[in-house]
Amino acid sequence: MAPFLHIFFCMKQITIKKPVKTSGIGLHSGKRVNLEFHPAPENTGIVFRRIDKDYFPIKADISNVSKLAYATNLTRDGVSIATTEHLLATLIGLGIDNIYVDIDSEETPIMDGSASAFVYLLKEAGFKKQNAEKKFMRIKKPKHYLSGDRRISVYPYDGFKITYTIEFDHPLIRLQTRTLELRSPEDFENEVSPARTFGFLKDVEMLRKNGLALGGSLDNAIVIDSDRILNGHLRFSDEFVRHKILDVIGDLALLGYPLLGHVVAYKAGHEIHTSLAKEIKADPECYEIVGASKLDFISPEGFVMAGEPSIV
Ligand SMILES: [Zn+2]
């Protein structure tokens, strides 16, 4: 029998109870940005809106992916939202189906380089169960995407599991591999969300010459020199691979539904993650959209945030 996942996977769609806001700077643009989360009606999905462009909406959908330069950017009719992945990972990780993400600039705020601030903010907003049935994208047959020695696959699985492996020719990283199964919002909050983005000091000059990482600092990224980490201690001994898990959750959020499958990635990145999402979407035999009531491993009690009975 399939494992019984008693929370996280629930019967009804979820939005937030009330609007919440914060501000920060864009990692690549270096621009100051205000961010607001607003409740959204059933079946809206995740929709970004540019406050500074008359609330121009851009759905978090793989068809809107534009240039991928060290981040996953969305563009529709010439209007863009850059560096969406950590925000999207948080929304999927907490089980939120419908939400408006309003920003007044071209890039989301990087906060501390992890998803912790977004988790904190969304918990403050609270979660609200809606009437419509929650839907999932269930993988029915394996799908693979390869580029050189980088690769990613997804396999049928009754749940959402990720196995990620990274390999860097650097003494502080080398080979890191981790399998994580997301069974509850706490799994995301505790095991994934605190992991920060990382970069190498030797690359900083090249990135800045290309107009990237202009907002990057030791406050929002782990910076690695040839033999040391410039900003003190890591939050996990394998924080690097955990951050890659955060990234892939965010990129696969662009499928438009929470995924039921086992994702296995090796030395992948935004380009590879989003390419897999495109391949899945292009092959209707690979998946089905299925309502929660059709899944025998989902509990009627549904989604509960630990310690806080936050559903009304
Ligand atoms: Zn990232």
Image: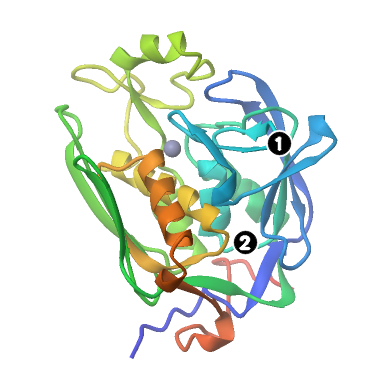
At horizontal 57% and vertical 64% (from top left) the residue drawn is 95
Residue type at the position of mark 2: Ile
286 left or right, relative to 163: right
Which quarter of the picture shows residue 287? bottom left
Packing grade of label 2 (10 A; few <14, some 14-19, many >=20) is: many
**Residue 250 in sight here:** yes
Residue at the image position 54 percent from the left and 52 percent from the top: 254
Residue on which disc 1 sits = 77
- Is 167 positioned to the left or the right of 163 in the image? left
Rounded to the nearest angstrom, the CA distance separating label 1 from label 2 is 27 Å
Examine the image and state in which quarter residue 257 appears.
bottom right
Q: Is residue 48 left or right of residue 152?
A: right
- The residue that appears at 43% across and 65% down in the rendered structure is 283
Q: Which label number is shown at residue 18?
A: none
In this view, 176 is above or below 208: below
55 vs 105, left or right, is right
The three-letter code of the residue at mark 1 reads Asp
Residue at image mark 2? 96
Residue 8 visible in the picture: no
User: Residue 40, percent across and down?
Assistant: 77, 59
- The spot of residue 149 in percent (x, y) is 19, 41
**Above or below — where is 41 with respect to 57?**
below
